[in-house]
Amino acid sequence: MTSSSPRQIDYYFSLSSPWSYLGHPEFMRIVAGQGVKVAYKPAALAAVFEATGGLVLAKRHPARQNYRLVELQRWRDKRGVPMCMHPKFWPLDPALADRTIVALVLSGAPVESVLPQFFTGVFENERNLADPATIAELLAEAGLDAEKMLALAQSPAAAAAYERNTADAVAAGVVGAPSYVLDGEPFWGQDRLELLEDALKSGRAAYSPVV
């Protein structure tokens, strides 16, 4: 497919999602290699689950919870990352951290200057991303104005954008995180990144449920 402008992927994720953390470096490799734009769209996972018939982790059958732990270990090894299986500050309320990323988007700040450190902060370094002070430290470490970004993250504008992202996710057919939406076709899960890359390389038309 040829185009005068780069194709765009809508990237739905949450900083509470270990799968988002696991897939992020590989996703960014694909993005760089294929020259596509990314629309960063942190979304409220619990609301997505509720709207689409999914269950939050604590409500899933023990067999599903146990299988999830096995899969996390497999993908931790596959991706070659030092993931903590039971981080000290997880599960966490991701709203403030997610909305901080929203604030970066709204302000035009470089999201990638912070997002990898946020992911590793939760799942490698066991930092408390529900704590504004921790978020401020990460922002400052990235050379950003922590006070300004936190104020924007806690503003009505960021709250409204976060809600829009969540509504957009449901409307796009997203059922979990991470999800990557290319030309209206959702790819759910970091284990679908190979299929996403294939779609980008081939330039094929998007698939849909209508056959």
Image (cartoon, rainbow, N blue to C red):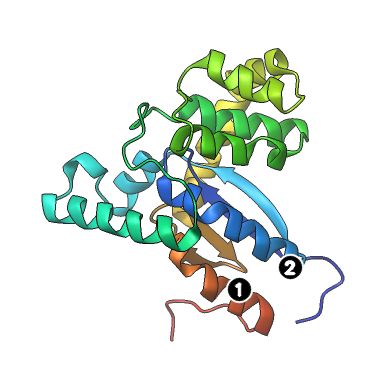
- Mark 1 element type: helix
* Mark 2: amino acid: Gly
Disc 1 from disc 2: Cα separation: 9 Å
Q: Is residue 142 above or below residue 9?
A: above
Identify residue for label 2: 33
* Mark 1: amino acid: Glu
Q: Are marks 1 and 2 in contact (CB under 8 Å)?
A: yes
From the top left corner, tell me how far across and down residue 204 is, in percent.
63, 84
From the top left corner, tell me how far across and down residue 43 is, in percent.
49, 41
> Left or right: where does residue 12 sit relative to residue 114?
left
Identify residue for label 1: 197
From the top left corner, tell me how far across and down residue 53 is, in percent.
26, 53
Q: Is residue 2 above or below residue 124?
A: below
- Mark 2 element type: helix
Q: Residue at x 43, y 45 (%)?
A: 83
Query: Which residue sits furthest right?
Result: 4
Residue 105: quarter of image = top right
